[in-house]
Amino acid sequence: FLFSLRNLDPLTETYGIPFYLQYLAHWPEYFIVAEAPGGELMGYIMGKAEGSVAREEWHGHVTALSVAPEFRRLGLAAKLMEMLEEISERKGGFFVDLFVRVSNQVAVNMYKRLGYSVYRTVIEYYSASNGEPDEDAYDMRKALSRDTEKKSIIPLPHPVRPEDIE
């Protein structure tokens, strides 16, 4: 493993090494790195496939997306998202989802431009530090071709709590 300054970015969710290794072991195809010609890490995306096929909830999930500040506004995040969506299509997913801090309007707007919409609000999803209150998240979704009726993106009328998420 190489340590990446991407993980020091305050907008990047950071996990312990066992978490990354678990994802790499179970869903290696969902772990994509963009590297500059000189070897510098430009950004990465990691995710997984999860859910129930019977209930039409089989989907790709974006766990983390991070692009280095010097490589932002070049379309790299959009390309990484597109690659993850293509993998989820090949795996027969109905949709791709992700969680984003409600306060991160730059990311929320980017995801909307990429075709995602807010499916539900998850109350106090992100744990705070330094005595700050916990922060809500948007669960954003984009329907894939298997969801011909776009049922997976019909917004819920009320917020949910983290323990209510399957």
Image: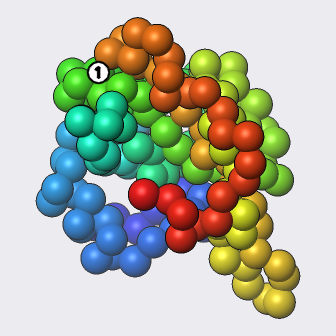
Q: Residues within 10 Å of mark 1 (few under 14, many from 20)?
A: some
- Quarter of the rendering occupied by the C terminus: bottom left
Could you tell me which residue is drawn at 83 percent across and 90 percent down? 131
- Quarter of the rendering occupied by the N terminus: bottom left
Foreground residue among 141 and 19:
141
Could you tell me which residue is drawn at 32 percent across and 37 percent down? 55
* In the image, farthest residue toward the left: 25
Q: Position of residue 139 (x, y in %)?
A: 61, 45
Q: Specify whether 15 is left or right of 109.
A: left
Could you tell me which residue is drawn at 44 percent across and 33 percent down? 96
Could you tell me which residue is drawn at 54 percent across and 63 percent down? 164
Q: Specify whether 55 is left or right of 134.
A: left
* In the image, farthest residue toward the bottom: 131
Q: Specify whether 71 is left or right of 37.
A: right
Instruction: Please give the residue where the numbered disc 1 appears in the rendered image.
Output: 89
Foreground residue among 127 and 3:
127
Q: Is residue 145 above or below residue 111?
A: above
